[in-house]
Amino acid sequence: MTHGAARRVFLAGDSSVADRQRGFAPMAGWGQPLPLFVPGAPVINCARSGASSRSFVDRGRMAWILHRLLPGDLVLLSFGLIDMKPDRGRHTEPFAGYQHYLRGCVDGVRDRGAHPVLVTSQERGVFDAHGNLRRLLGLYPPAMKETAADKSVPLIDLNEWSVRRWRRAGPRGVREIFLHLEPGDHPNYPDGVFDTTHLRAAGAVECARFVATELRDRSMLEPGCFAALESAHVTAEGLEWPDDHVFAELTRNRTLEVAE
């Protein structure tokens, strides 16, 4: 999947991938720090909080991407955390609707001469009373893997990587990865927060580094597109959150309507 020149990287996914504005800091999706590791290719993060594979398609967000794709672009597709919820407009069954929407996205990207890449969702940071990590995403990662095999699509298994990483961290260590804050720790969360789904900046940087390393090691972009993959200096401190009004301007063009 090598290119003659660096192309763009589009991200389609849910809140685990999405950019966050300053009012949500230190929460961040892994798509937010990805440009730190892929400075040689523009990253267009179209992921949205609360999106499932179904709602991303049904509300026109995938069409927005397809309308703008050029041959050779990459599209990273990462859904599952919201698909499992019972919401009528978002829910899909792993080996039914979920795979149907993934296949449709893959076909749409390929029809435009671009390259789809499936990325399994990171696992939630939930441990049982005995300190064992729970696999709460259930059959969604296996369903995505089956789709990748059936459609011959590259797969980045962020889920399996995250399971190993969270297990090493343990119940206490994941507090530095997920949005666990005590009252008074951060002005955006004065009463504290205990979130086992959304990453804080440090966790987002770790996930982005893994995704970028996979892109490099599997020659999905030119070698010159990457930087700092082994550098300990790329940390959460280097991540920026745009002000709310700037964030609104950045996302204004990524509307539900494809027509301009």
Image (cartoon, rainbow, N blue to C red):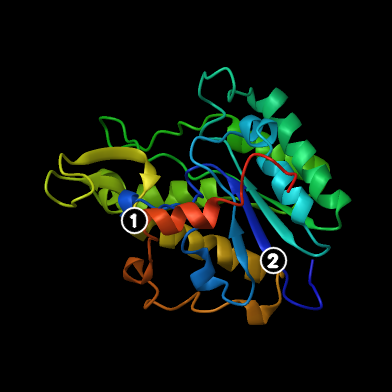
Toward the viewer: 22 or 122? 22
The extreme front residue here reads: 260
Could you tell me the amino acid type at mark 2? Arg
In the rendered image, residue 80, in percent from the top left (x then y), is placed at 57, 35
Q: Is residue 182 left or right of residue 9?
A: left
Label 1's element?
helix
Residue annotated with mark 2:
8
Q: Quadrant of residue 132?
A: top left
Q: Is residue 155 left or right of residue 127?
A: right
- Can residue 19 be spotted in the picture? no
Q: Is residue 185 above or below residue 98?
A: below
Q: Quick one: quadrant of the N terminus?
A: bottom right
In the rendered image, residue 69, in percent from the top left (x then y), is placed at 77, 57
Could you tell me the amino acid type at mark 1? Arg
Label 2's element?
loop
Q: Residues within 10 Å of mark 2 (few under 14, many from 20)?
A: many
Residue at (72%, 60%) from the top-left corner? 74
Q: Is residue 85 above or below residue 36?
A: above
Q: Quadrant of residue 60?
A: top right
Q: Residues within 10 Å of mark 1 (few under 14, many from 20)?
A: some
Give how far apart the Cα atoms at labels 2 and 1 are. Answer: 25 Å
**Residue 22: assigned label:** 1
Residue at (62%, 31%) from the top-left corner? 55
- Can residue 36 be spotted in the picture? yes
In the rendered image, residue 255, in percent from the top left (x then y), is placed at 62, 44
Say whether disc 2 or disc 1 marks the residue closer to the N-terminus.
2
The extreme left residue here reads: 184
All told, the count of numbered labels is: 2
Residue at (88%, 49%) from the top-left corner? 111
Toward the viewer: 117 or 44? 44
Residue at (23%, 48%) from the top-left corner? 188
